[in-house]
Amino acid sequence: MPLKFLHTADLHLGMTFKNRHYPDEVREQLVEARFDVLAGLVEKAQAEQCQLLIIAGDLFHRANVAPGVVERAVEILERFQGCVALLPGNHDYYEPYGAIWRVLREKAFDGLILLIHMQPYPLHEYGIEAVLYPAPCDRKHSPENRLDWITGLDERPVGRWHIGVAHGTVRGISPDFEKQYFPMHEAELVTLKMDHWCLGHTHVRYPDLDHVERETFIYSGSPEPDGFDCRHGGNAWVTELDDKGHAVSRSIKTGRFYFCELQRQIQSRTDLERVHQELISTTGVENSLVKLKLSGTLPEADYETRISLYNHIRDALLYLEIDDSALAIEITSEVISSNFPEGSFPHRLLTRLAEKDDREALQVAYRLVEGVKQ
Ligand SMILES: [Mn+2]
């Protein structure tokens, strides 16, 4: 019988989303979504009949997250009728007397395995013929990973499957310019001869495919997007290891919210309405958080009333941030005449550019003379 497990990481429970000016009700939804996705993962693992649920670090956002957050997580995880293996990541790193790990030890249920020590964790007593080899984080940053103990191991416990669980970056795959996130090398992971490596830290799945086979390591990515640098719908892996130790992983969609950044150039109210149409025809628009950058021009009257159009777009979305600093009033002969006396240098210059229909030069020149006027 193959071994089947669900692999996730980077849920960041306890994240408060105070980094942006989200309205309170949006912020609350983002906070709650992290607990909901954990509950969803447990349900999916159950429905897929997984024997094991592996969380490869950063289940919690901070090492000093409120005890209530940890208790809620345990209550959700306890619903899973298999084993839960939990690795400390660099956000929820292991400290023997740290809030998270103290509460977890106190509230632990049978089947919750805290991968806190650099030692093999055989799962035979849970009816699983696998051995887990963790690389637990014990601080926020480290230039060295926690894999050495595996190399130095004299003998491995008997087991049909040997699975590594690590949190940190892999050179060339996840950005770590200052080499402070427990950096690993793919070659190192290969040398350690595991049947499979479940990694956490990078919030985007790797490989970015729906189906992968016999990869040395895979990152689950975050199951629920948490910001504008996380442009996917949230994923997790359901992995099967066959009797020969060959791994096949299937990506499952897990998230609710979707963050996206758009840039649009507009020249009329119709163009802006088209952006609105484009957004509302996207599925899941009500759960979308959008950063929209507008450039181009609008006729004066539309420019003056653009905010009501923005609000119209905003109503369809969960959250909208608009940057229209590159959007300007369209310069027409009326605009020129109402701002500059006829015969003046600016009037003559702008009128000539308007006649040549050189929109870009006209906008630049208008901005310049307006600047001088002030
Ligand atoms: Mn991390």
Image (cartoon, rainbow, N blue to C red):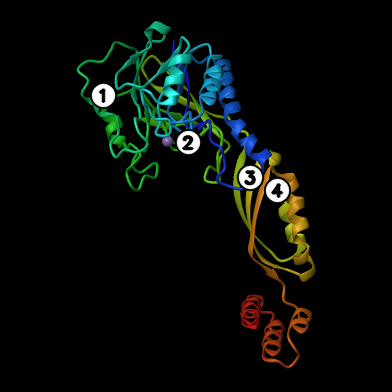
Q: Secondary structure at mark 3?
A: loop
Residue 187 percent location from the top left of the image = 28, 35
Query: In the image, is residue 160 above or below residue 305?
Result: above
Q: Nearer the viewer, mark 1 or mark 3?
A: 3
Mark closest to the chain's N terminus, 3 or 2: 3
Image height of 222 relative to 54, above or below: below
The kind of residue on which mark 3 rests is Tyr
Mark 1 residue element: helix
- Compute the Cα span from label 3 to label 2: 26 Å
Quadrant observed for ligand 1 in the rendered image: top left
How far apart, in angstroms, are the residues tagged by discs 1 and 3? 44 Å
**How far, Cα to Cα, is label 2 from label 1?**
25 Å
- Quadrant (top left, top right, bottom left, bottom right) of the C terminus: bottom right
Q: Please tell me which of labels 2 and 1 falls first in the chain.
A: 1
State if disc 4 and disc 1 touch (CB < 8 Å). no
Determine whether 57 is above or below 353 in the image.
above
The quarter of the displayed image where residue 1 is located: top left
Left or right of residue 240: residue 350: right
- Toward the viewer: 153 or 27? 27
Residue position marked by numbered label 1 in the rendering: 150
State which tag comes first along the sequence, 3 or 4.
Answer: 3
Residue beneath disc 4: 279
